[in-house]
Amino acid sequence: MTILYPERTSRIMIVDRSEVARSIISHILQKEMPDAYIVTSGSAEEALEYLHREKFDLITTALLLPGLDGLDLCHEVRKSDKQHLTPVIVVSSDADTRLLREGFSAGVTDYFNKSLGYKRLVEFIKDVCQRHAGLVGRVLYIEDSPSTAQSTITLMEKHGLYITHVTSGEDALRLLKKAQNSPDSPDVEQYDIVFTDFFLEGQMTGGDLLYAIRTQLHYSRQEMPLLVITIEDNQKCQAEIFHAGANDFITKPVIEEVLIARLKSLLLVKHQYNVLKRYSKDMYQLATTDSLTGVRNKRFLMDEGPAFIHQHKQICLMMIDIDHFEIINDVQGHIIGDHILHVIGRFLLSYFADDVMLVRFAGKKFTALIPNAGLDKGKVIAENLRLKMLELKPESIDITVSVGLTSSEGVAETTLATLISDADSALHTAQIQGYNRTCLCVTHKNITAA
């Protein structure tokens, strides 16, 4: 079994006896769905070992496998508590009588004709993932009646939902605050939807919880859908529920079809919000990254730099300029010049630590904001960089850089504008003094060579 990528968005298992087929499908799928986590397996037995440990959003399997075949695998999936609702696609070039007769009774979700090609298969997989994405999520469920909670949890888990159950609004709010404060921590549960009884015992009612989620945590109806269950079904109660911030409500006793339909609808809202959020983040990443060098661009520095400076007690700003680059462009041509910029950009990305904000400031000039660093530390980093640049020799051309350096140490109030101005002044001094050197700006009027 081969694990291609760590945990991401869609979790897909590909089962095929052919290593070549597994490799081709997973390669195309990873290009089409870069966020997908893909596992490949050469047999049903090997696949079942993994399925016992982890839940998947989609399984594709060849019909013919060594040992248990694709339909046998599907039977085992449907018997699993964890996987019984997972879509299973059987991939075969021969829709034989057994597949047509027994496939759907075995729990096969769909069949794909392998002769249509791997690219069409990947498109088919993407479509199935989208159609089944609406009811995959984690529910924070608040109910103080043990009997009601147990029966409702069993019902929701039967439909493939992950449930975290608490009995009070206070506990729910605490978990939501923890999730909001640690959105990227693998040890902190994140929730797709809140499902609560409106009439909870204790100081915090269900209505109080809804109001807190909207006003204290500032979750919108798309970012955190809220479903309410209540015993009353009158206009006054409905108005109160919606006024408190709910997206929707159901009444007791719980009707399975109604509950699942409501949850599916709200989880789809959450899913669409996540997609738009990722798309927006990707677009911002694209808009604030320099396409030639791969480092961030000046817009990113202007957008994020002030907050970055504010987050750190001490900051060092380094202005790096490629010496005599205009001559390289004139003699070697702009294509060679662009390639040299690309190589230097990749080198700088590898040279600086991940917490450094590295930016292509303008043309041949780069800026690095180094957190938790004063002039002494910055000088060591700058001089080491300058010496390593002598060894780089992109396109077999000798490259040197001049560096201007400044820091916030000893300055009462630091701004991005003053740091840039001071570092630029130090850089200008380095160039006047003969290039290929580092100069430090200790104060506005005191510039020294390293």
Image (spheres, helix red, strand yellow):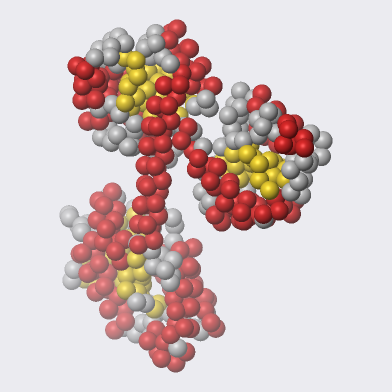
Q: Is residue 64 left or right of residue 138?
A: right
Residue 315, x across and y down, in percent: 30, 56
| Snapshot quadrant of residue 220 | top left
Relative depth, front residue between 362 and 399: 362
Relative depth, front residue between 161 and 208: 161
Q: Is residue 92 left or right of residue 368?
A: right
| Snapshot quadrant of residue 429 | bottom left
Residue 51, x across and y down, in percent: 65, 32
Quadrant in which the N terminus is drawn: top right
User: Is 259 situated above or below 5?
Assistant: above
| Snapshot quadrant of residue 445 | bottom left
Extreme right residue here?
67
User: Is 232 situated above or below 291?
Assistant: above
Extreme bottom residue here?
331
Please tell me which residue is depicted at 70% across the width and 50% down the height of the picture. 114
Please tell me which residue is depicted at 53% across the width and 82% down the height of the picture. 395
Q: Is residue 43 visible?
A: no
Residue 290, x across and y down, in percent: 39, 67
User: Is 109 situated above or below 26?
Assistant: above
Quadrant in which the C terminus is drawn: bottom left
Q: Is residue 10 left or right of residue 416?
A: right
Q: Is residue 70 left or right of residue 177?
A: right
Q: Is residue 193 visible?
A: yes
Residue 184, x across and y down, in percent: 42, 40
Relative depth, front residue between 347 and 274: 274
Q: How many marks?
A: 0
Please tell me which residue is depicted at 36% across the width and 82% down the height of the picture. 435
Please tell me which residue is depicted at 81% across the width and 39% down the height of the picture. 66
